[in-house]
Amino acid sequence: SQTIHQWPATLVQPVGSPLSLECTVEGTSNPNLYWYRQAAGRGLQLLFYSVGIGQISSEVPQNLSASRPQDRQFILSSKKLLLSDSGFYLCAWELAASYEQYFGPGTRLTVT
Amino acid sequence: GDSVTQMEGPVTLSEEAFLTINCTYTATGYPSLFWYVQYPGEGLQLLLKATKADDKGSNKGFEATYRKETTSFHLEKGSVQVSDSAVYFCALSDRWGGSNYKLTFGKGTLLTVNP
């Protein structure tokens, strides 16, 4: 069966520091991968998606970036965090063209 | 563009009460519809889905029927339990960028069930 992992589970970082969040999927090949952010009291906002290694599309321009160095690995990064980057970050995978997404446990990021 | 509107919460019920969470959508294509549930501190779990008009998705006592004529996908449960306390998200998936699909979420409805 397929599983999706995210780490770290929680993170507290000062403003201006770098960020790296990691997501890995097991038990499937060539999944579509997604990064979402959930801010307090708001719904989910799609940040990035990837349909293959090295292929990244951005939904919302901001100081975050994403990379997909391996088929089942998706990384969310920032060079300098802002207070507004605080939130709950969720990674999701989807079998290509299957229209069903499955979510990881999330990372709670607090920027102080 | 596509959008999902669901009833604002929070919703507070007593155990064994009937639950309805309303969800309506706007889409340019012919979307699939989903309900996801998020328990405190966790990621989202797919609760149920429907892929075409008049389909009824069901799971764990929850049901929702795809109503194309009213563009709705309301979530119902006949008798809620304390363990159903969570945030519920309505979502649609529509074709986007060729063969890929994009999920559009509602803002979520917090349900609290008291014993």
Image: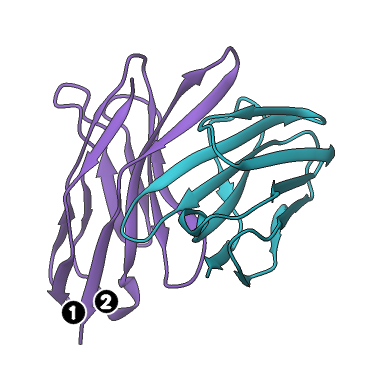
Q: Check the image and report above or below for B41 versus B98.
A: below
Q: Which residue is mark 1?
A: B15
Which residue does the image show at 54% across and 55% down from the upper left? A82
Instruction: Give the left or right position of residue B53, taking residue A6 as reference.
Output: left
**Pointer 2 chain:** B
What is the three-letter code of the residue carrying label 1?
A: Glu
Q: Nearer the viewer, residue A38 or A12?
A: A12
Q: Which chain is purple?
A: B
Residue at (14% x, 26% y) in the render? B70
Identify which residue is drawn at 16% across, 55% down. Answer: B20
**Location of residue A112 with respect to A26 vertically, above or below:** below
Q: Quadrant of the C terminus of chain B?
A: bottom left
The chain letter under disc 1 is: B
Task: Point out residue A94 in the picture as x, y percentages from the top left corner.
Answer: 63, 38
Crowding near the residue tagged with mark 1, few <14, some 14–19, many ≥20 C-alpha atoms within 10 Å? some
In the depicted view, which residue is nearer to us: B40 or B70?
Answer: B40
Q: Are marks 1 and 2 in contact (CB under 8 Å)?
A: yes
Query: Residue B98: percent from the left, percent from the top?
Result: 58, 12
Question: In the rendered view, would you say B11 is above or below B64?
Answer: below
Q: Which chain is cyan?
A: A
Amino acid marked by disc 2: Gln
Left or right: residue B15 versus residue B99 is: left
Q: Residue beneath label 2, please?
A: B81
B30 and A77: which one is in front? A77
Residue B2 rendering spot, x and y as whole percentages: 33, 24
Q: Quadrant of residue A72?
A: top right
Tag shown at residue B108: none
Q: Looking at the image, which residue sits at the far bottom?
A: B115
